[in-house]
Amino acid sequence: MSTALQAELRNIPPVKLVLDGVTKTFRTKRAKVRALENVSLQVNEGEYVCLVGQSGCGKTTLLNVIAGLEKPDGGRVLVDGKPVSQPGRDRMVMFQETALFPWLDVMGNVLFGLKLKPNLTDNDRLEVAKFYLRMIGLDKFTHANIHELSGGMKQRVALARALAPNPRVLLMDEPFGALDALTREQLYGDVQAIWLKRRKTVVFVTHNVREAACLGDRVLLLAPEPGRVIEEFRIDLPRPRDINSVSLAEYSTAITRSLKGYSEDREVAE
Amino acid sequence: MKRVILAAGFFVLAILAWQLLVAANVWSAVLLPSPLSVARYLLGALADGSLLGAAWVTTRRLLAGYAIGLIIGLPLGLLTAQFQIFRDTIGLVALGLQTLPSICWVPLALLWLGQTESAMLFVVIMGSLWSVLIATETGVRTMPVIYVRAARTMGSRGMHTWLKVILPASLPFLVSGMKQGWAFAWRSLMAAEIYVTILTGFGLGQLLHYGRELHAMDQVIAVMLVIVLIGLLADKILFSPWERFLRRRWGLTA
């Protein structure tokens, strides 16, 4: 590994992500949706935080606001004290659909963000891209076309693409939702291994409670209408974690109970 | 190799059938010349340069007009996709004019520009411009927004997003739109060339027209063959590479 590559990989400054009273409302012709109301939370350097909730609870909106893809109506998002106003390379997103570019091959996709990153030579970029492709185990598929890959491989490429510009924060929006259970379990292992190696700050959105308990340091429970954080769980389990382990099941049961209890309360109230 | 032999066999059989029809003397030789006399005309016209000259005049008009159509149509299509005001104005005009058979532009072109190359160019441009514009607009507007969002998170902005994301993402539509634009340009030019004689250059259309005037059926058929050949060549040279790329990269069966 060249020194340039090593320097590039080591270069991750600490980050603290702060959301302060974030509010976002969508107006359609017929209704007003309060996607987020007064959401405040903090994510520490190197922390893995999962956002869980039923669909429509604003978790994707929250992620988009952090990414800078959507502007909040009220409140602020701060990265190291600096307000977020637009997307930036320090916060990379791995999307629900793969969002890989079909006009580029695997390498082209991983290089896309790197090419926009200044202060690197083309050689560095190539080396960094190869490094991440090796990390996700797709170095044999460098020049494969996107349509030739399986769903799991596509999401691996998406992960490599998001990691390649060396972001400080990784935002993952239900990245494994469309995959089959076996592929998913494999990817849980991979993501944990990569996270342990690269120590990114991760905000991970999912509706799968078990997945959240398996991956997160903390699991935040979101409720819809208006979208807000209702409860927080700290997962004190050693890594790597096995999604099928009993101790993990205890956590996910507790979270599920809380989630159900909340929606029942709401039904009674209505 | 087997494909080549089969295809060659088909064409040899077709020509044989043609020759048999001629030999059967069902129609007079004035109406159906033998393959040999068509070939004789082709060789003669090739030798005296009239055929190549006409083909060159036509191709030049077509390429120039088509290129201008693309240069105007692509950016206008992008603008139409992006801005509501363009959609309500230029977009509507394009939709309307696309349905206008391009031969209808000929009288106007002749009155405005006289019997000049410009009149020919004008007709070709009008023939190709609108379908290129509409295809570009459709391509951009049906492109998944997620590509642009993903690109923005990776630091892509403005022109970079247009050139590296929106245009390539619309490529399947662009290629089919450009192909359609080419077909329209080709048709409108042939119609214009048959319809009016332009003294600045004799194209294939004129050659075809004079074939009719002279009752030279061998010339008519030979020129038609050449027109078909040019169309085929254009398809193979201009569009096949793009379509191969789309099939390979996107897995599209376009």
Image (spheres, rainbow, N blue to C red):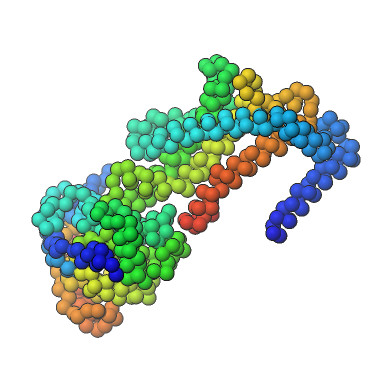
x and y percent of residue A62 in the render?
A: 21, 57
Quadrant containing the N terminus of chain A is: bottom left
Left or right of residue B199, residue A88 in this image:
left
x and y percent of residue B241 in the render?
A: 54, 49
Residue toward you, B245 or A218: B245
Residue toward you, B229 or B85: B229
B17, above or below A106, in the image: above
Total marks placed: 0
Quarter of the figure with residue B202: top right
B206, above or below A161, in the image: above
Q: Residue furthest right?
A: B24
Whether residue B139 is visible to the viewer of this picture, yes or no, is yes
Residue toward you, A199 or B41: B41
x and y percent of residue B219 in the render?
A: 76, 31
Residue toward you, A28 or B134: B134
Whether residue A156 is visible to the viewer of this picture, yes or no, is no
Quarter of the figure with residue B222: top right
Left or right of residue A36, residue B148 in this image:
right
* Residue shown at 78% from the left, 23% from the top: B214
